[in-house]
Image (cartoon, rainbow, N blue to C red):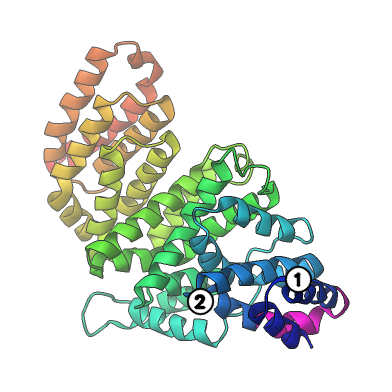
Amino acid sequence: MAQVFLDTFFNEKDIAQKCAWDALETLACRFRDSVTKVVMPLLIPKLRSRDMSEQDNAVLALKSLAKGAADLVAPHTSYIFPFLIGRLENEAIAVGDTVYSWSHNAEFPEATHLPDIETLQCLDYTERKIIGDSESGMLSTGPAERHQLTESRGANVQFTALMLHPDETLRSESCLVLETLVRASKSTNTRDSISSKVAIAATHAGANFLLGNFCSLVVTLAEGNTLDRQWTSAILTGLLAHLLSDDKDFGNAIELQLVETATTVVCSSVASLAPFSYFISTYCMEVFIVPHDERLLTGALFLLTGLIQNLGAEARHSFSADRHHNTFESIHALFRHPQPKAVKATLYGLLGTLAKYDVPIYFLSEVLPLLHSELDTHPHRIIEESALLTNVLWCFANVVKYDLGG
């Protein structure tokens, strides 16, 4: 019966469509499990339809179903969002209203359902992309890494699979989801429509995504074409902005300390991916050179620091030798643009890491003049930042002692 009403809803207009809509909502209230099981598999393909009117109707049907069985519909949101939000990028109010229906009728889960057949096919492609590729020599993953990637399955798998899917439309739509969530959450026009419960759930989903799927993004940065790299970089930027946002809706959802821990964990998980250090560092350099939000900048500094800490000694030496020019161009940029104390403290932490972890002695010749100029220009910082500077200089002194044979 639910399928009949759904067919009527999509194929008829005006009064017949309205009656089918009301009937669907009533059925969803009365026969929650069975209706949801029947209707959801039919709705999801229609959300992906290239026919805009069919997509519009699917959104309406989804909202109707959510009113009657929100707790059963909500677990599907991680699969629906890439299409729903991508489709309605410029209609954030409609997205907010739809999310509002879910959030006010049920708890919004983070990751609760298994992928369907089509998603599993995407996942198969994703795992070949991440794990397989031994013939190309680009990746070297053992049982531990393979297990870790398998453990990251859940709602976030859909995003990863779609971002690596051969179909350009699917890639584009999945790329939009996090950016749109961020924009919608900050918009004064939609703030009332999107509840804090959804905002917090989205933040946690972003944290899980960063931890579980960073390898996928790095692979795409390494192997993708120019367009692929552009949207992957946008995802990374969106993720960090999302996680580090100091917007009041997100303020209590995630702390900066958690991000510091998360980036260290992420870098530990990609320690065997030394060939990709170039692409990770390139992304960080772009964040450093172009003026960014303070917390986004701090997150990128954490990311680069964690990368250097978790690379092996040989890879670190190669990394610093190959990248030292861009690294210091970026550090110069940070010194040229006065940053709040939190950013400067993290910058000194990065300098200390560069000095501590087997970085060649020629770094001294570039860093010390920077520090001297900084203190000469801003003498009051000698007191404010003496502990940080002492740590950096202590690290450099140990490098000198080591390189000069004690």
Q: Main secondary structure of the magenta part?
A: helix
Return the residue at label 2.
Answer: 49
Type of amino acid at the residue the image marks with label 1: Lys
**Image height of 167 relative to 207, above or below:** below
**Image height of 250 relative to 158, above or below:** above
Q: Residue at x 85, y 74 (%)?
A: 26
| The one of 352 and 59 positioned closer to us in this rendering | 59
**Image height of 3 relative to 88, above or below:** below
Disc 2 on helix, strand or loop? loop
Q: Is residue 274 visible?
A: no
Q: Is residue 294 visible?
A: yes
Q: Is residue 206 magenta?
A: no
Disc 1 on helix, strand or loop? helix
Q: Residues within 10 Å of mark 2 (few under 14, many from 20)?
A: some
Q: Which region shows up in magenta? A: 29-41
Q: Residue at x 53, y 56 (%)?
A: 206
**CB atoms of marks 1 and 2 within 8 Å:** no
Image-based side of 9 in relation to 224, left or right: right
Position of residue 394 measured from the top left corner of the image (x, y, whole percent): 28, 31
Quadrant of the rendered structure where residue 135 is? bottom left
Q: Marks 1 and 2, how far apart in space?
A: 21 Å
Position of residue 198 measured from the top left corner of the image (x, y, whole percent): 66, 53
Residue sitting farthest toward the right: 30
Type of amino acid at the residue the image marks with label 2: Ser
Return the residue at label 1.
Answer: 18
